[in-house]
Image (tube, helix red, strand yellow):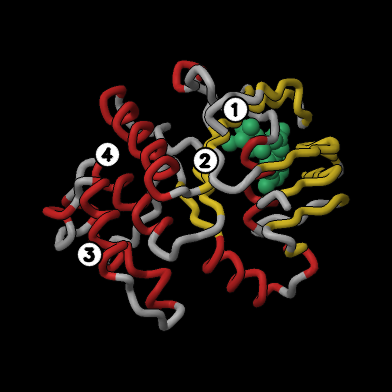
């Protein structure tokens, strides 16, 4: 069974009396270990879909299955636990907690769950991401690129089924953008991590990668690359 199945997902926001359709019937399937790019103009529904997959937002209609679990059939509490254990989120603005060190930020998903850290995996992650020297630093003492590498480590420390990265390079310069892209692809190839990355920057997609294109709440393109 595919890791992620979205079936006919609809979502309309209501702003006062105005209805804003954000998703108009999205069908999407992703296999374990795949790397998928989601592109499309601003306002086309990419973030709404990420929020629905993460269980942060609820579709009006349709179904989302992650590893066979219908996440929107869970209670709010169950959904929060499912998300913490199974979904790694990376945002444009890093979202690190300012009062925690890099290491404490990275370990947060485990400490919230009362879980032990797999030391070998932690070391492999830190080495691959190149942030060993930053572990004792606080977010304000790190560059944007370092903060995002730290946020990626936090997203992956609990070995989630799925990593969702919404415009993870949106606040970074070109050099850091290319570095983060390289690292995300490494997370897929070396750790078998399933990754969905949203970007409106077509420069970032690579030959052979799966690219799903959104327009106005619908999928208008899905090129299945060889690297899935
Ligand atoms: P993208 O991530 O592709 O830029 P979004 O999913 O953020 O697109 O937005 C899709 C549409 O839904 C847009 O028209 C946006 O204005 C609207 N939208 C998104 N979130 C909300 C919200 N919380 N309340 C009202 N409208 C929203
Ligand atoms: Mg967005």
The Cα atoms of the two marked residues, 2 and 1, are separated by 16 Å
At label 4, counting other C-alpha atoms closer than 10 Å, the crowd grade (few under 14, some 14-19, many 20 or more) is some
The Cα atoms of the two marked residues, 2 and 3, are separated by 23 Å
The residue closer to the viewer here, 41 or 220, is 220
Q: Are marks 3 and 1 in contact (CB under 8 Å)?
A: no
Q: Which residue is mark 2?
A: 166
Q: Secondary structure at mark 3?
A: loop
Report the residue at 29% width, 54% height from top.
125
Upstream in the sequence, badge 2 or badge 3? 3
Q: Which residue is mark 1?
A: 210
Q: Quadrant of ligand 1?
A: top right
The label number, if any, that marks residue 145 in the structure image: 4
Q: Are marks 2 and 1 in contact (CB under 8 Å)?
A: no
Report the residue at 76% width, 37% height from top.
22
Where residue 189 sits, quadrant-wise, is: top left
Q: Mark 2 or 1, which is nearer the eye?
A: 1
The Cα atoms of the two marked residues, 3 and 1, are separated by 36 Å
Where residue 43 sits, quadrant-wise, is: top right
């Amino acid at each position: 069974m595919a890791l992620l199945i979205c079936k006919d997902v609809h979502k309309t926001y209501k702003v006062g009396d105005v209805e804003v359709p954000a998703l108009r019937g999205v069908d999407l399937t992703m296999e374990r270990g795949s790397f998928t790019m989601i592109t499309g103009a601003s306002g086309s529904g990419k973030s709404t879909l990420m929020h629905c997959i993460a269980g942060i937002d609820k579709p009006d209609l349709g179904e989302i299955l992650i590893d066979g679990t219908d996440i929107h059939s869970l209670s709010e509490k169950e959904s929060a636990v499912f998300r913490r254990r199974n979904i790694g989120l990376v945002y444009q603005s890093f979202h690190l907690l300012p009062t925690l060190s890099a290491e404490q930020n990275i370990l947060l998903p485990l400490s919230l769950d009362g879980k032990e850290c797999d030391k070998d995996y932690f070391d492999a992650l830190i080495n691959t991401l190149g942030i060993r020297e930053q572990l004792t630093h606080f977010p304000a003492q790190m560059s944007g690129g370092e903060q995002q590498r730290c946020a990626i480590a936090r997203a992956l420390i609990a070995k989630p089924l799925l990593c969702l990265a919404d415009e993870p390079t949106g606040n970074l310069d070109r050099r850091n953008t290319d570095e983060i892209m390289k690292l995300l692809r490494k997370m897929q190839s070396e750790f078998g991590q399933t990754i969905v990355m949203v970007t409106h920057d077509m420069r970032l997609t690579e030959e052979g990668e799966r690219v799903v294109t959104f327009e106005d709440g619908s999928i208008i393109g899905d090129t299945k690359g060889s690297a899935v």
